[in-house]
Image (cartoon, rainbow, N blue to C red):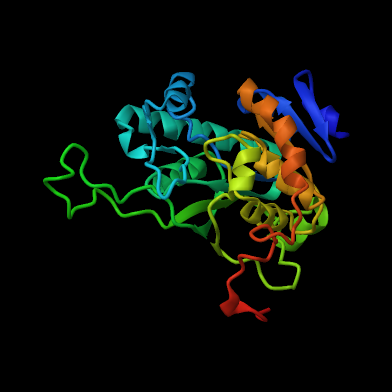
Amino acid sequence: MTPVDWALDYDATVVGRSCLIHADCFEWMSRIPACSIHAIVTDPPYGVKEYDFDQLEKMRNGNGGIWRIPPSFDGNERSPLPRFTALNGADRKRLSRFFAEWARLADRVLRPGGHVLIACASVLAQLVYSALAEGGLEFRGQVIRLVRTLRGGDRPKGAEDEFDNVCSMARGCFEPWGVFRKPLGHLRVSDCLQKYQTGGLRRMPDGNPFCDVIASERTPQEEREIADHPSVKPQSLMRQLVYAALPLGEGIILDPFMGSGSTIAAAEAMGLASLGVERHLDYYSLSREVVPKLARLTRDQPGVSVQASLPMWEEGAR
């Protein structure tokens, strides 16, 4: 299939080896051929409130809603962060149903042995991972992105002065990415590699294993100016993830929650084929401009090199 063939009858844009598709991923994933995708790399909206239209409007107006608008430090504006601790029992049940159903579709479209790398939040990881396993995906661990964020560490809301030596939860210094795989069935990893080009993760260019801890950075200002999205990930991280997701460097990477397109841009920069699906028209339209610009950022810029974040204590290990 050519890139545009994946669009079916949806509005789409081809960028290099990739196709950006304006569609709801649940509907689109139910229609494409089964066992046709090699890997999924995505940062989902958690299927609850933060990307509902009313909550996005509150965020843009500075009213917050589920979005926490961090204060400015030293003149630097910080990106809004969704307050997942605000979710109630009904929200959590909705989230669980969302991811269990999505996992069933992921299991349908992935080739046997195809990996899923999915961004999460530590406070939601247990719930999300359980739902993905319920939907048929095999839990394979986590990639820990070491990055200091502004999530957590706040004093008790409404009693900041009274309890100024207390934080309601620990300050976040890492971001978990769940690692899942479509079950191999009766196949061995070598069988999947030979037949489907899936089953494992790609070693880094120097031959070292892909590590499950990545010392990362906040998304650089240059990239945030290119991609006006509240949760855009840095290219220095995304290029490592898409590289690792295809063990033989062949196949198609899917981001079913594309947003402004940082995953697709990373795939383009690494010379990999990818598909991005986004249901919000504003973000889909934005991605058509963002993907080529992010993809053109040179790999030897600070914070963009594929190997810049590799743990140095393992250098030379095989």
Which residue extends farthest left? 162
Relative to residue 177, is residue 189 drawn left or right?
Answer: right
Regarding residue 185, the answer to whether it shows in the image is: no
Q: Residue at x 69, y 32 (%)?
A: 287
Task: Please state the horizontal and vertical placement of residue 265, each as a whole percent of the image.
Answer: 72, 43
Q: Residue at x 68, y 49 (%)?
A: 114
Which residue extends farthest bottom? 316
Relative to residue 103, is residue 127 drawn left or right?
Answer: left
- Foreground pick, 298 / 191: 298
Q: Quadrant of residue 206?
A: bottom right
Q: Is residue 181 above or below residue 33?
A: below
Q: Is residue 73 above or below residue 90?
A: below
Task: Please state the horizontal and vertical placement of residue 41, each as a whole percent of the image.
Answer: 64, 45
Task: Please state the horizontal and vertical placement of residue 297, each as a whole percent of the image.
Answer: 74, 50
* The C terminus, quarter of image: bottom right
* The N terminus, quarter of image: top right
Q: Quadrant of residue 20?
A: top right
Task: Please state the horizontal and vertical placement of residue 117, each as a whole percent of the image.
Answer: 60, 49
Regarding residue 117, the answer to whether it shows in the image is: yes
Relative to residue 137, is residue 19 drawn left or right?
Answer: right
- Foreground pick, 193 / 17: 17
- Foreground pick, 304 / 112: 304
